[in-house]
């Protein structure tokens, strides 16, 4: 093999649907697709932003879903999965942001941090330490309760209502409420301790 | 399928509905002594009270989110960046939590390496720990077929990375196709992979994600070197980290875990062990040999996560050879070409050992797989060296059982297909037996032959117990005959110079099935062959001789060769009593067989009346003795005794050759039954057992008429029974004198 040639394509993750790539790899690929779409939608919304205007976070995701072709797209024949990926994308963005801000604060640049507030979103999202704690807690919670964790992610990171989330998860509203109460209590208590 | 609520949650939910003292009472009851549980629920309830708006959102922060999206960086690192002393050149892979870059190193040596770094946003403590354990695991290993770890570290912001040997290669599946490697060459290459995995296992590391994209082949000095890379979901066997491959309901259509072992598919973290890797290796070998994966990825992805799990855990894939032959012409041609074979030779190559070896790896129940990767490699070696392979029997029986069980409804309890499958597996067992060539082989043969014997016995008893022979039509019988014939031919061809218990068993089974489908002449030849095979055994085997003689006698008897039949059975009895010291039950069985023949003799048209009586008496005596022996050893009520009687009955009811014969049977049965009842103190002496008479004789009288029957009774000297008949029927026209 020639040393100077670029990496052999076969070492890269493959798109070959006949191969048995791990669930994770494909999930990542699709996730970055979601991410790109969200960014595009974000850009277009921001370009048309006016004062006093509010935008539902969920609207972003919905629009990205439509743009990507929705159920007509073979890879996305599952709206639930799309939203789940969107929640995951948001989660990662928030974490990144939290770390960045913590680094800035450390460096003494509080002002930049202040400008960067997230309005209209839960207070907790502006609390960087909380964001990081929540990530850890949610990860532990998700080990034993993967579906409940999914519910939390959809509600917290995408902003879905209980009914919307229940619908997406294909569970009844009472079940969703039950799960939400438990998950919330669990996470709250877990984070309070740290 | 919803995840089930755990106990803590259920109690919490219920408690929420209650208040004050009601709640306290409920908690007391629900938690019982478990103070830990009570504490947890209490703190959850407290949390619930405090966390009213927690995690709730009005949802209006869309613009903020949009801004956040704008500001975030899509990609952590860029080509040209430095991480440590490594310059990133090009991203070559991406996994769940890490990214793999090709990087360049200048000091202390100039070379290209692979650098794996944790993704941003993925660095929970958990994942960092896992990443670190992967690095450690790799560092522990030192094997030419495993990619080496050179270095490790962390970025200033704390993200860990490690540096590995850059493997430039082609996926093993692609390599084999490109080079058009034959099945045997692929197996040789595969053995090297096994050696690598074995090495890892010895270091206490389970790969858990073995698949073609993780096994690359490079060529060094003309030799193909497979390299196992990406121990990405590695688990050091001693570590407490459990694998949390969470398949939420959403990941249903993403990717297809064809390479994932059934136990890995379970959500709850089972104790995974090295055999999970063996499963994945099996899937790989399956693909290398047959050109396809055991399960169709497209089909799996359409099923959803539960369906997928069900298939992988429960459905048995086709054998590689069968899977191949099920494909269309075009596919088969291209696959065969990639193996330097034609579409006919490839399945032949795969049938037999290669098939079995693969299927043993793919067992759902991991205790049935190879114990170690080494065992797998050795079996492949044996095959390559034309030595017999160990992996057969349980698999076949297991699959047969499962196949029958699953398809019982479809088969309609038909014996035909079961028989065919059964003989197919016998044929397979046969293939493993070769003519003895050496002392060492003789020992191996002896061992294997014992295994096969067991196998054959268990199959037969299983089939026998499960399915009653109900020949539905000529077609089915024909099918069985054909399969039998083929098996016979195969036996003749392969076993003429093989001597072993397995061969004896085989002939016995063949004979038994011929017997069941009433091909008594063929059954006779089988049993004679069986006796010959017994002679050929190195040690005299009386147990088998007895068995064979009994069976031979039965087959002869059915054909009417009564004298010879009797001779055989008497010889069997002699052996039992003199050489074998057989148990009472065994002797009893032979006696029952003998009595059957004697009854036939009694009913035979060649007997004179006197003779008939004598013969019949002899038959009754045989059966009486059989019953006595059984009662002595088993007690009065044992089912064996009833079985003897039943056996006696069944043996005859379906063969109404002549009324005389039938009558003779009735008589004997009546007497036996009477004896039986008498022994149980149910009725007085047999001769006055009217109700037995009514039960038994009723049907024959309907057929042949009371008069004739009466005459038969008299002919047999059954005056008592004759009287009963007369008393039960009115005989208008004929005066019968007794």
Image (cartoon, rainbow, N blue to C red):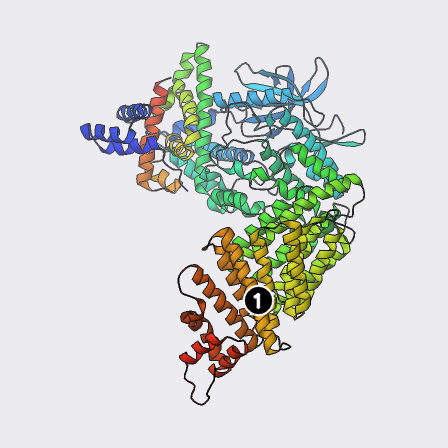
Q: Quadrant of residue B656?
A: bottom right
Mark yes or no: residue B720 visible: yes
Secondary structure at badge 1 equals: helix
Percent of width and height locating residue B257: 56, 39
Q: Judge by depth and name the residue closer to the eye, B146 or B594.
A: B594
Q: Quadrant of residue B438?
A: top right
Q: Farthest residue in the top direction?
A: A108
Name which residue lies at 76% across and 51% down.
B536
How crowded pointer 1 is (Cα within 10 Å; few <14, some 14-19, many 20+) is rated as many
Disc 1: which chain? B
Name which residue lies at 67% across and 36% down.
B376
Name the quarter where the N terminus of chain B is drawn: top left
Name which residue lies at 60% across and 21% down.
B135
| Total residue callouts | 1
In this picture, residue B188 sits left or right of residue B206: right
User: Above or below — where is B113 with respect to B438?
Assistant: above
Percent of width and height locating residue A118: 38, 23
Q: Judge by depth and name the residue closer to the eye, B405 or B48.
A: B405
Mark yes or no: residue B481 visible: no
Q: Quadrant of residue B213?
A: top right
Residue receiving disc 1: B619
Percent of width and height locating residue A19: 62, 40
Q: Farthest residue in the bottom direction?
A: B733
Name which residue lies at 68% across and 20% down.
B104
User: Above or below — where is B96 with respect to B626?
Assistant: above
Percent of width and height locating residue B612: 59, 74
User: Above or below — where is A25 with respect to B735?
Assistant: above
Q: Judge by depth and name the residue closer to the eye, B477 or B305.
A: B477
């Amino acid at each position: 093999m020639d040393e100077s040639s670029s990496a052999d394509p076969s070492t890269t993750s493959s798109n070959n649907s006949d191969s048995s790539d791990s669930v994770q790899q494909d999930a990542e690929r699709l996730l970055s697709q979601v991410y790109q779409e969200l960014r595009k939608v974000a850009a277009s919304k921001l370009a048309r932003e006016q004062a006093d205007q509010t935008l539902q976070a969920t609207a972003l995701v919905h629009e990205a879903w439509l743009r990507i072709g929705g159920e007509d797209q073979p890879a996305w024949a599952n709206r639930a999965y799309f939203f789940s990926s969107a929640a995951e994308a948001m989660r990662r963005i928030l974490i990144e942001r939290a770390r960045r801000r913590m680094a800035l604060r450390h460096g003494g640049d509080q002002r930049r941090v202040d400008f960067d507030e997230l309005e209209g979103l839960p207070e907790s999202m502006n609390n960087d330490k909380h964001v990081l704690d929540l990530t850890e807690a949610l990860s532990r919670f998700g080990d034993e309760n993967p579906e409940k964790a999914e519910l939390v992610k959809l509600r917290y990171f995408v902003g879905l209502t209980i009914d919307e989330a229940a619908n997406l998860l294909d569970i009844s509203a009472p079940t969703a409420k039950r799960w939400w109460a438990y998950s919330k209590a669990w996470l709250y208590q877990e984070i309070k301790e740290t | 399928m919803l995840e089930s609520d755990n106990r803590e949650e259920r109690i919490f939910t219920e408690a929420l509905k209650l208040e004050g003292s009601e709640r306290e009472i409920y908690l007391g009851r629900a938690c019982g002594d478990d103070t830990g549980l009570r504490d947890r629920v209490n703190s959850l309830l407290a949390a619930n009270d405090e966390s009213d708006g927690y995690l709730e959102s009005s949802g209006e922060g869309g613009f903020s989110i949009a801004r956040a999206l704008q500001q975030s960086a899509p990609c952590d690192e860029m080509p040209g960046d430095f991480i440590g002393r490594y310059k990133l050149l090009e991203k070559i892979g991406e996994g769940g939590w890490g990214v793999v870059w090709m990087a360049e190193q200048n000091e202390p040596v100039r070379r290209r390496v692979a650098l794996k770094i944790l993704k941003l946003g993925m660095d929970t403590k958990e994942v960092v720990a896992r990443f670190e354990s992967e690095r450690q695991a790799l560092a522990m290993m030192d094997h030419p077929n495993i990619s080496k770890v050179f270095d490790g570290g962390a970025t200033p912001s704390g993200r860990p990375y490690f540096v590995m040997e850059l493997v430039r290669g082609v996926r093993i599946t692609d390599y084999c196709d490109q080079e058009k490697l034959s099945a045997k060459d692929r197996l040789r290459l595969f053995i090297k992979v096994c050696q690598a995995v074995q090495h890892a296992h010895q270091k206490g590391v389970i790969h858990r994600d073995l698949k073609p994209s993780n096994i690359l082949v490079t060529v060094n000095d003309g030799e193909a070197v497979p390299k196992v890379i990406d121990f990405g979901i590695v688990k050091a066997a001693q570590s407490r980290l459990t694998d949390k491959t969470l398949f939420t309901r959403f990941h249903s259509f993403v990717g297809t875990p064809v390479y994932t072992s059934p136990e890995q598919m379970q959500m709850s973290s089972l104790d995974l062990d090295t055999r999970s890797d063996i499963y994945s290796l099996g899937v790989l070998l399956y693909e290398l040999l047959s050109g396809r994966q055991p399960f169709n990825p497209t089909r799996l992805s359409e099923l959803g996560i539960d369906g997928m799990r069900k298939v992988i855990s429960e459905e048995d894939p086709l054998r590689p050879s069968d899977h191949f032959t099920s494909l269309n012409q075009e596919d088969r041609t291209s696959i065969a070409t990639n193996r330097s074979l034609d579409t006919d030779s490839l399945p032949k190559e795969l049938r037999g050992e290669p098939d079995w070896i693969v299927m043993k790896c793919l067992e759902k129940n991991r205790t049935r797989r190879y114990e170690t990767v080494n065992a797998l490699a050795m079996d492949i070696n044996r095959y390559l060296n034309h030595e017999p392979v160990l992996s057969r029997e349980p698999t076949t029986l297991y699959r047969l059982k499962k196949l029958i069980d699953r398809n019982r409804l479809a088969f309609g309890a038909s014996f035909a297909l079961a028989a065919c499958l059964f003989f197919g597996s016998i044929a397979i067992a046969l293939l493993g037996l070769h003519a003895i060539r050496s002392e060492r082989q003789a020992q191996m043969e002896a061992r294997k032959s014992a295994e096969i014997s067991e196998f054959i016995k268990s199959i037969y008893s299983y089939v026998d117990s499960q399915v009653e022979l109900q020949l539905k039509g000529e077609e089915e019988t024909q099918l069985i005959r054909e399969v039998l014939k083929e098996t016979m031919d195969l036996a003749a061809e392969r076993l003429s110079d093989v001597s072993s218990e397995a061969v004896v068993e085989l002939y016995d089974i063949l004979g038994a099935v011929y017997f069941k489908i009433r091909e008594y002449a063929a059954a006779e030849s089988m049993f004679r062959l069986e006796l010959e095979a017994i002679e050929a055994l190195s040690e005299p085997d009386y147990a088998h001789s007895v068995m064979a003689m009994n069976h031979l006698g039965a087959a002869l008897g059915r054909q009417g060769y009564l004298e010879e039949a009797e001779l055989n059975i008497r010889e069997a009895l002699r052996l039992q009593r003199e050489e074998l010291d057989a148990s009472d039950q065994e002797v009893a069985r032979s006696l029952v067989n003998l009595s059957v023949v004697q009854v036939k003799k009694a009913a035979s048209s060649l007997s004179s009346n006197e003779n008939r009586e004598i013969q019949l008496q002899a038959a009754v005596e045989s059966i009486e003795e059989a019953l006595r022996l059984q009662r002595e050893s088993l007690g009065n009520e044992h089912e064996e005794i009833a079985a003897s009687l039943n056996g006696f009955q069944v043996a005859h009811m379906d063969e109404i050759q002549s009324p005389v014969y039938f009558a003779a049977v009735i008589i004997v049965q009546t007497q036996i039954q009477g004896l039986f009842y008498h022994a149980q103190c149910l009725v007085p002496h047999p001769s006055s057992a009217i109700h037995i008479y009514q039960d038994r004789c009723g049907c024959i009288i309907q057929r042949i008429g009371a008069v004739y029957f009466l005459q038969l009774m008299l002919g047999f000297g059954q005056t008592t029974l004759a009287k009963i008949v007369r008393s039960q029927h009115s005989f208008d026209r004929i005066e019968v004198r007794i």
